[in-house]
């Protein structure tokens, strides 16, 4: 599966990122209520959380397709995923640092690691996109 990337470190970083994204999609779609309650959010946000989960499910499908077909020519996909990932990273840290929401710290750390993995993989294959 990694041979389409021709760059094992990039494929591994993006593969670990993919596993993290799968975890969040599973959490947002199938464990919505407990996850929201754990983060101090009421049930009125269930619809929005599931929409976010399905949006990231689309990104997961795109990532799997890059493993099947290779990353060549998928520049717009990787840029859109980069924007979504950095936006998520910034939002979580804003919530933790400025809004002082104590329930997002663990997600901020996890998303920081996932963002770092994505950036490593992205910049290693950027010349092929």
Image (tube, rainbow, N blue to C red):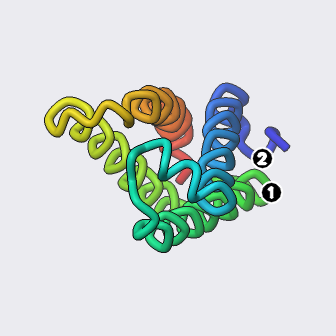
Task: Report which residue position mark 2 lands on.
Answer: 4
Q: Residue 84, position in %: x, y?
A: 40, 55
Residue nearest the observer in this picture, 80 or 114: 114
Q: Nearer the viewer, mark 1 or mark 2?
A: 1
> Image point 44% across, 70% down: which residue?
48
- Provide the residue designation for mark 1: 68
Image quadrant assignment for residue 26: bottom right
Q: Is residue 52 left or right of residue 92?
A: right
Of residues 49 and 56, which is closer to you in this image? 49
Disc 1 from disc 2: Cα separation: 7 Å
Would you identify the image quadrant in which residue 125 lies? top right
Count the labels in the image: 2
Q: Position of residue 19 (x, y in %)?
A: 70, 41
- Can the viewer see residue 73 in this picture? no
9 relative to 101 in the view: left or right: right
Q: Earlier in the sequence, mark 1 or mark 2?
A: 2
* CB contact under 8 Å: marks 1 and 2: yes
Q: Few, some or many C-alpha atoms within 10 Å of disc 1 (few <14, some 14-19, many ≥20)?
A: some
Is 74 in front, or is 33?
A: 33
Mark carried by residue 37 = none
Asked if residue 1 shows in the view, the reply is yes
Q: Mark 1: which secondary structure?
A: helix
Q: Nearer the viewer, residue 117 or 127?
A: 117
> With respect to residue 87, does 32 lie above or below?
below
Q: Residue furthest left?
A: 98
Q: Secondary structure at mark 2?
A: helix
Q: Measured along the vertical axis of the image, is residue 39 above or below residue 46?
A: above
């Amino acid at each position: 599966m990694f041979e389409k990337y021709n760059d094992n470190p990039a494929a591994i970083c993006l593969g670990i990122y993919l596993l993290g994204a799968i975890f969040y999609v599973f959490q947002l779609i199938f464990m919505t209520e407990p996850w929201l309650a754990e983060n101090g959010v009421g049930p009125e946000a269930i619809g929005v959380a599931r929409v976010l989960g399905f949006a990231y499910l689309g990104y997961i499908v795109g990532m799997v397709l890059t493993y099947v077909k290779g990353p060549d020519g998928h520049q717009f996909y990787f840029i859109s995923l980069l924007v979504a990932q950095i936006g998520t990273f910034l939002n979580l840290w804003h919530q933790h640092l400025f809004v002082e929401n104590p329930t997002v710290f663990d997600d901020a750390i996890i998303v920081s690691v996932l963002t770092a993995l994505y950036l490593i993989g992205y910049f290693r294959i950027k010349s092929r996109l």
